[in-house]
C-alpha cells in the first residue's frame, strides 16, 4: 500500500511538472500567477513545482511584468541551456543533422549527400551516426549526454520497438532503422514520419504559431502534408500525415513513381519540375548536378520564358492541390515548407494563392491563409528534434527522454 501511495505521489508530481513546463514551452514566459490561472493548480502547488524546476535548471527567472495593483511579477521561462537535442532529416537527396538547444534554437548543422549510397539503409545509418558525432563535436558535447535524438523519415514507421520503416520513396520496406542506429547512438532515439514532425515544429516555432488548424505541406523530391492542431499542452496537440502527394489531379496524367498516373507529386515534386523544364527544346542545361542546386538555378531563371512557363504551371498544380486540402480540411493556415518549398516558395506563392482563390469554396478560402515556412533550411531536422523534446516535456523535465 505504501509503495502504491509513493507511486501515485510521483505520478502526480510528474504530471504537475509536465503541465507547467509544457505551458511555458509552448506559450512562452509566464508569471506564477499566470501559471496558476492557466493550470487550475493551487498557488502553493505552482510555487512548489516552479521551485523544483528552477532547482533542476529546467527553467529560470526572467524579467518582470506589471500585475494588477500590486508588485511586478517575476516571469518564468524555459532554459535553452537545460540540454541539447538532435534532429535528423533523412531525405531522398541528403541527410541533414541539426543540433538544437532545449528550446529548439539551432546550434550546429551538418549535411551529408546520399549520392553514391543508393540510399542503402546501412549506409544511411552510418551517415546519421557520423553526423550526430560531428554536430556534437562542434560544440564539445559528448553525444551520450544528449537529451535525445529524433529522426524524420519520408514514410511510415511501425512502432513495435524496432521502428520498422516503410519508405517507398527511398525503396525501403520494413527496414529496422532503430536497430541500425542504436549501434552508434547511445542517447534516447525516436523515429517518425518527417511531415508529421515538421508540422509540429511549424506550429511550435514557425509559420503555424497562432493557428488553430494548419496544414503543413512538405515539398521536396516527394510531396507530403501534415494536418496539425494547436493546443495548450504538448499532449493535446495532434499532427497526422496524409499521402497528399499521391492524390490524383489529372486522370491518365504523368506517370508517378508510386505506379499510378496523374498524382500531384508527378507535377510539383522537385525532380518532376526539373524534368519538365529540361524537356522543353528552348531550355538551358543546368550547371549543377544535384537536385537542390538545379532547382535553385531554375528559380533564378524565373524571368526567362522557359523557366517562367514551368514555374507558372507548377504553381497552378500546387494551387489545385492546396485547393483540395482547403475544401476537405478547412484549415485556417496552409504552410509551404520543406527544402523545395523554401526554394520555390518566393517565386510561386502569388500564383499559388491566386489559383486557390479561383478554385476553392469562397467561404473556406476566406478563412485560410497560405504562407511560407519560417524555420529555414533545417526545418525538417528541427521537426525531428521535437520527438525527444516531447518526451522530456512528458516526464516534466526530469532528465533525458526515454525511448
Image (cartoon, rainbow, N blue to C red):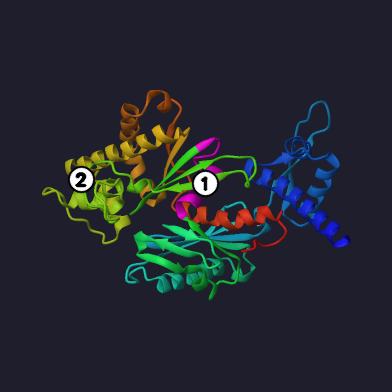
Q: x, y (%) of residue 219?
A: 37, 49
Instruction: Give the residue at x 74% y 56%.
Output: 57
Magenta segment: does it hold 200?
A: yes
For label 2, the crowd category at 10 Å Cα-Cα, with few meaning under 14, some 14 to 19 and many 20 or more, is: few
Rendered image: mark on residue 239: 1
Instruction: Give the residue at x 31% y 27%.
Output: 358
- Height in image: 191 above or below 255? below
Region of the chain picked out in magenta, as a range:
194-213
Q: Residue furthest bottom?
A: 183
Q: Residue furthest top?
A: 363
Which part of the image, by quadrant, shows the N terminus? Answer: bottom right
Q: Is residue 152 visible?
A: no
Question: Of callouts 2 and 1, which one flags the residue occurring earlier in the amino acid sequence?
Answer: 1
Q: x, y (%) of residue 50?
A: 79, 48
Q: Residue furthest front?
A: 1
The residue carrying mark 2 is: 252
Amino acid at each position: 500500500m505504501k509503495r502504491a501511495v509513493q507511486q501515485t505521489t510521483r505520478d502526480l508530481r510528474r504530471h504537475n511538472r509536465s503541465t507547467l513546463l509544457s505551458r511555458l514551452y509552448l506559450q512562452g514566459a509566464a508569471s506564477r500567477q499566470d501559471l496558476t490561472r492557466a493550470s487550475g493548480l493551487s498557488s502553493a502547488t505552482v510555487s512548489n513545482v516552479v521551485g523544483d524546476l528552477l532547482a533542476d535548471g529546467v527553467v529560470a527567472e526572467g524579467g518582470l511584468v506589471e500585475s494588477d495593483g500590486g508588485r511586478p511579477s517575476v516571469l518564468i521561462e524555459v532554459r535553452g541551456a537545460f540540454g541539447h537535442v538532435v534532429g535528423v532529416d533523412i531525405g531522398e537527396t541528403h541527410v541533414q543533422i541539426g543540433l538544437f538547444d532545449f528550446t529548439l534554437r539551432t546550434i550546429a548543422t551538418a549535411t551529408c549527400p546520399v549520392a553514391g549510397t543508393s540510399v542503402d539503409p546501412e549506409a544511411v545509418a552510418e551517415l546519421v551516426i557520423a553526423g550526430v558525432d560531428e554536430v556534437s563535436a562542434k560544440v564539445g558535447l559528448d553525444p551520450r549526454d544528449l537529451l535525445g535524438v529524433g529522426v524524420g523519415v519520408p514514410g511510415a514507421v511501425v512502432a513495435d520497438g524496432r521502428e520498422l520503416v516503410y519508405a517507398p520513396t527511398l525503396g525501403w520496406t520494413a527496414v529496422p532503422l532503430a536497430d541500425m542506429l542504436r549501434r552508434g547512438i547511445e542517447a534516447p532515439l525516436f523515429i517518425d514520419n518527417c511531415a508529421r514532425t515538421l508540422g509540429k515544429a511549424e506550429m511550435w516555432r514557425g509559420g503555424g504559431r497562432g493557428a488553430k488548424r494548419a496544414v503543413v505541406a512538405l515539398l521536396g523530391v516527394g510531396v507530403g502534408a501534415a494536418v496539425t492542431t494547436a493546443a495548450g499542452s504538448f499532449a493535446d496537440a495532434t499532427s497526422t500525415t496524409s499521402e497528399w502527394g499521391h492524390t490524383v489531379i489529372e486522370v491518365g496524367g504523368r506517370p508517378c513513381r508510386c505506379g499510378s498516373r496523374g498524382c500531384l507529386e508527378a507535377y510539383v515534386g522537385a525532380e518532376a519540375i526539373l524534368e519538365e523544364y529540361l524537356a522543353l527544346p528552348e531550355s538551358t542545361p543546368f550547371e549543377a548536378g544535384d537536385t537542390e542546386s538545379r532547382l535553385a538555378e531554375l528559380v533564378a531563371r524565373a524571368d526567362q520564358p522557359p523557366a517562367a512557363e514551368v514555374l507558372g504551371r507548377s504553381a497552378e498544380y500546387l494551387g489545385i492541390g492546396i485547393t483540395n486540402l482547403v475544401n476537405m480540411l478547412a484549415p485556417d493556415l496552409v504552410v509551404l515548407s520543406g527544402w523545395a518549398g523554401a526554394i520555390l516558395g518566393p517565386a510561386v506563392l502569388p500564383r499559388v494563392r491566386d489559383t486557390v482563390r479561383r478554385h476553392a469554396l469562397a467561404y473556406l478560402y476566406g478563412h485560410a491563409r497560405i504562407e511560407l515556412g519560417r524555420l529555414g533550411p533545417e526545418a525538417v531536422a528541427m521537426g525531428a528534434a521535437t520527438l525527444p523534446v516531447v518526451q522530456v516535456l512528458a516526464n516534466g523535465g526530469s532528465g533525458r527522454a526515454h525511448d
